[in-house]
Image (spheres, rainbow, N blue to C red):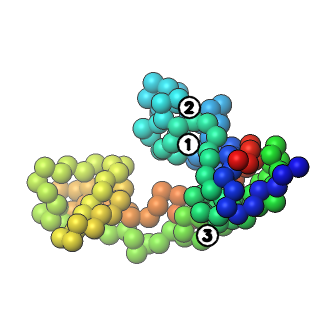
Amino acid sequence: MAQAEKGNTVTINFTGTLDDGTIFDSTLEATECDDDCCDDSCDDGCEDDECGCGGHEAGPMTFVLGEEILFPQIDAAIVGMSPGEKKTVKIAAVDAFGEYDKEKVFTVPRSDLPEDLVPEVGDELSLSNEDDEELDVVVLEASDDQVTFDANHPLAGEDVTFEIELVSIQ
């Protein structure tokens, strides 16, 4: 039976979970979304990354093995797999979305923000500086005088586990 090698175009199904079992990303419709967070149907993709959709449509994912579309550890695990084979890959936080960095939490005077921006706790925003560099942040605190932002990835500090199934090798 054929085995996957770097450079092959492969199709996989996967489910990414946190240590507490929370699904944060999946190609499987059955586990992809809960009814409380997805618009209309998971078949059309998902607008809210909190539900485990990961921002992509349901269904197997096809990519060239070795291009590190997901994580290098996943590519390494797929090498040598045959269609139908399944593996579990655990990735430490430092190698996944990074450790949580307290220095990525910062406070800005409200007077430095655009007048039409009215941030509320939990808002996800994209801030830009004078050089048009963008920084994705979450609002942690908002008072009349200042706003505290967190620029860490939402999964920073989390170990992640991927259940992978190799569907096919093209």
Which disc, if any, is residue 34? 2
- Identify the residue position indicated by label 1 in the image: 52
> Splitting the image into 4 quarters, where does residue 111 fall?
bottom left
Image spot of residue 139 (x, y percent): 33, 55
Q: Gap between marks 1 and 3, in whole Å?
A: 20 Å
- Judged from the image, the secondary structure of the residue bearing numbered disc 1 is loop
Decide which of 69, 37 is in the foreground and name it.
Answer: 69
Badge 1 crowding class, 10 Å Cα cut-off, few under 14, some 14 to 19, many 20 or more, is many
Badge 2 crowding class, 10 Å Cα cut-off, few under 14, some 14 to 19, many 20 or more, is few
- Identify the residue position indicated by label 3 in the image: 95
Q: Is residue 84 above or below residue 102?
A: above
Decide which of 111, 13 is in the foreground and name it.
Answer: 13
Image spot of residue 98 (x, y percent): 54, 69
- Judged from the image, the secondary structure of the residue bearing numbered disc 3 is helix
Are dots 2 and 1 in contact, CB under 8 Å?
A: yes
Apparent side of residue 104 relative to residue 22 in the rendered image (left or right): left
Q: Gap between marks 2 and 3, in whole Å?
A: 28 Å
Apparent side of residue 143 relative to residue 139 in the rendered image (left or right): left
Residue displayed at 28% across by 48% down? 120
Single out the residue that lies furthest toward the top.
Answer: 40
